[in-house]
């Protein structure tokens, strides 16, 4: 008896996790604790807090893959402790990366000789790929200008206003002016004619998007190529094209193989694609592919010694995991053309199904196109009573994460909801979503028109109010004027106010969706 | 009977993986195959090819963590499909990142008020962190010069020649001149006096390294700070300091808490540290911490909407996994100061043990210091007969991956072997390594002096020769002169030639510090 009592006092592991003191004491949030805690407790504390995150599989906001086969999960897990950059130590991993680059280059019709190796790199995502591609264009342009004795201090890049935020980031960090082609209502991609008009001698490249972030539409790269060829002929410049195929790069070759957007067009010098979107790999892998060696200035390349052979590298990162590269290789050989085509066809058909379901409600205008990335972007025909942000908020209570956002400048009075159809979004889920959207519409019809003015926040009154105020942090002030109301009315108003607050914040946003 | 036969013909899954046709047919290497293959076959094909990679745990070349607790592995696995950048959807993950930033900033003695939030970001690694920090210095310098009406077209950065390759990368990609303080024999870190001498009005910052890549030595940041303060006073500039604490940032605060290298020194404006080195997380996480908001120009920050609150972001990447951030938080709260101190003490003691073991052989000069990152860098006292590259190659046959490399310019006649002591390198393994090094030394003594000239390659004679030629690819031509030898002699010479070829290649690279 005595013995067993002693052991239970001294040995922490005898307690079950939730019977231990670690769930009773709060950890310092912003400082490292002084003492260690048992690993079970650490696991449980973190795991439990993470329950409050959204569920990735129900996140319809993002293209980024949320499901892979268990076999691939195992390969990923096994490679977690392998540093991708140790090419000398892990030659096979390096070889798999090179194979992926070559497979993707062939998929994009790079003009390669029989035994010629493709030029490209694996990256953390399309952002890194775009910075690398942009840097290559900038350096090539600088070198050419310097050789001609011309100034090279005012480079610019031409894109549509619908590009993802990373282009703006590239421009700001690498000191290149971003010239955006404005959008107009009903036309949400870059107009090739306007783009080519904006090209001048300082333009390092025109960036086209295959799969606009906003509505998934493919830009007309072929027309851009033709117009630019003509302009280059007249002016004597040789302004090249980059295609940001982050989302569409693994769609177009399988669903519309005849569509010419890739290296078949002579001015397309580089393409980026996200492996973690329709490349069907978890977040953390992208690819940048160049047309040929000449399009990548040698001075940007660092040479690493790889088994006595020279392994050129071009990256903004250094040490990183190998898992995603291996996972990409798994998908490419496991699925092959056949498998990718089947997956993309499924996605496309589920998108069409969802689109029809939404059209049937009679309340929505569909903004996305049939040919494009499998997503459905839609806006309310009449948003005078309730708007898209309210729908997004209410869908969240059903578990769906559907983003609502306004279009960029010159079309910013349009708000859209966007549902991305990923591989793991089955027909059953699509049916369910249509049902839930219908329910939300009914609920909204029964709600009063949303409040425009500032609404009351009665801080001490209801628990809900406290939660709202706490959630708000230091960023916004609630101007409260006290009115006598029932508790439920108050709560509702606070919630409405809060939703509006969030919605307004969101409206001012750049294209940070991914 | 008939039925069962039919099913076995039609159903691929009846075959066991190795009885299926997928191990018999070769996949196209550089093109996507036309048809799908079963997932078990794909798994097995990749898994089996990866067996030929080195074993990460025995890779003594790298600081990067190769082992974590199974509980943490589970957290990582669970968050593989969570995109770190979706802050709105995964608010808890974002909060964990912010907590990590604050914990690390406090660890580095950032001058924070009680309720003040630290300024910093999680990155993919120290490379990204360094680019971000460098970019901030460059932009701040540009803004200041522009305000004064001075030219901004020739920024430079002062570092030691011992810095990791990513500084060179930063310089080249962001168009900043890299001014390197030369090393001398026996002194393998940046000399603060020489560094401060090189500072001019165009210097955006001086970068010091806490834990030199080459021998783990800590640079004297305090002295640098004092000298630079004096120079700033005399000239009226305010050249700041960045500390690249990629490897030492989680060592110094636990083993030598009194060493002043961090935000306690007023000129230190930013620090980077690799979470995936002694932060004890798998590859893919680093941290950049700034002293205060003022040290990070606002124009570089992109604002993301995060639960209605504003979440500033500063990164070169966008979508990426959340696992590493969560794993870092796990380590910080699981281990606490106590746990990190214990781990670092173990590493340090194992390093000392290994150092003594190597000294006892009487053949090595130890190049690393007692105070520094737990690694042992050593070179042969006499490398006229056999050199360090041969030792590295021979250790590989025992399973150890120990890199040999030459020092940078002005000390490049020195070659060192470097063994990094990570958390998971136990005393038993250290003992084993000392034994194996002694064995290698004995083996080398019995081998003839390495050949300098061209060695005969007898094509078609032995399988080994073919392997050598195949392995060589297009990168080197072998000039063969035929000599009559026994097959074993020939094989040995070919091997030696090949080893030398690789070793020379390594030397020639004038070897930027691409070790990590």
Image: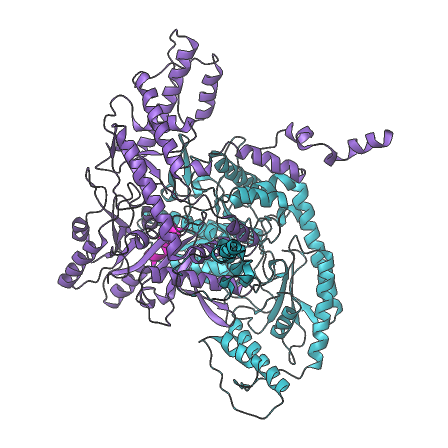
Chain colours: A cyan, B purple
Q: Nearer the viewer, residue A345 or A262?
A: A345
Q: Nearer the viewer, residue A255 or A166?
A: A166
Where does residue B47 sit, x and y in percent of width and height?
57, 36
Where does residue B219 sit, x and y in percent of width and height?
24, 49
In the image, is residue B194 above or below residue A16?
above
Dividing the image into 4 quarters, which one contains the C terminus of chain B? top left
Q: Nearer the viewer, residue A97 or A220?
A: A97
Where does residue A452 sit, x and y in percent of width and height?
57, 84
Magenta span main SS:
helix
Q: Nearer the viewer, residue B514 or B279?
A: B279
Q: Is residue A357 left or right of residue B182?
A: right
Residue at far bottom of view = A484
Residue at far top of view = B484
Which image quadrant is residue A295 in?
Answer: top left
Q: Which residues are magenta?
A: B125-135
In the image, is residue A269 above or below residue B239?
above
């Amino acid at each position: 008896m005595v013995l067993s009592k002693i052991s239970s006092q001294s040995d922490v592991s005898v307690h079950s996790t939730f019977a231990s003191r670690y769930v009773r004491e709060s950890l310092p949030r912003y400082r490292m604790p002084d003492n260690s805690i048992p690993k079970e407790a650490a696991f449980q504390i973190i795991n439990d807090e993470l329950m409050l995150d959204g569920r990735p599989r129900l996140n319809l906001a993002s293209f980024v893959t949320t499901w892979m086969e268990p076999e691939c999960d195992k390969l990923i897990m096994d490679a977690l402790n392998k540093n991708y950059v140790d090419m000398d130590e892990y030659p096979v991993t390096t070889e798999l990366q090179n194979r992926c680059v070559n497979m993707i280059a062939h998929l994009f019709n790079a003009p390669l000789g029989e035994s010629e190796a493709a030029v490209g790199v694996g990256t953390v995502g399309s952002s890194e790929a775009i910075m690398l591609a942009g840097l290559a264009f900038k350096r090539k342009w600088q070198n050419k200008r310097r050789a001609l004795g011309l100034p090279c201090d005012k480079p610019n890049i031409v894109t549509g206003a619908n590009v993802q935020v990373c282009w703006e980031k590239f421009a700001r960090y690498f000191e290149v002016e971003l010239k955006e082609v404005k959008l107009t209502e009903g036309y949400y991609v870059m107009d090739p004619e306007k783009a080519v008009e904006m090209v001048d001698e300082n333009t390092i490249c025109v960036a086209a998007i295959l799969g606009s972030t906003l509505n998934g539409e493919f830009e007309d790269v072929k027309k851009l190529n033709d117009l630019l060829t003509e302009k280059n002929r007249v002016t004597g410049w040789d302004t090249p094209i980059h295609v940001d195929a982050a989302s569409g790069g693994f769609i177009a070759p399988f669903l519309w193989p005849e569509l010419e957007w890739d290296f078949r067009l002579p001015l397309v010098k580089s393409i980026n694609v996200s492996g973690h979107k329709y490349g069907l790999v978890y977040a953390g892998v992208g690819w940048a592919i160049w047309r040929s060696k000449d399009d990548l200035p040698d001075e940007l390349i660092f040479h690493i010694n790889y088994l006595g052979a020279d392994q050129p590298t071009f990256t903004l990162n250094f040490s990183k995991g190998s898992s995603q590269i291996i996972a990409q290789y798994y998908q490419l050989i496991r699925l092959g053309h056949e498998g990718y085509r089947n997956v993309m066809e499924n996605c496309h058909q589920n998108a069409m199904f969802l689109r029809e379901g939404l059209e049937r409600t009679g309340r929505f205008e569909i903004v996305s196109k049939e040919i494009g990335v499998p997503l459905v972007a839609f806006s309310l025909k009449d948003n005078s009573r309730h708007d898209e942000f309210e729908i997004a908020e209410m869908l969240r209570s059903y578990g769906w994460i559907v983003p609502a956002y306004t279009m960029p400048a010159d079309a910013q009075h349009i708000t859209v909801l966007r549902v991305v159809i990923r591989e793991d979004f089955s027909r059953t889920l699509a049916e369910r979503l249509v049902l839930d959207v219908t329910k939300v519409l009914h609920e909204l019809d029964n709600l009063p028109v949303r409040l425009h003015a500032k609404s009351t926040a009665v801080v001490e009154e209801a628990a809900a109010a406290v939660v709202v105020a706490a959630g708000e942090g230091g960023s916004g002030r609630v101007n409260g004027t006290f009115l006598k109301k029932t508790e439920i009315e108050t709560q509702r108003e606070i919630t409405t106010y809060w939703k509006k607050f969030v919605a307004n914040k969101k409206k001012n946003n750049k294209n940070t969706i991914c």
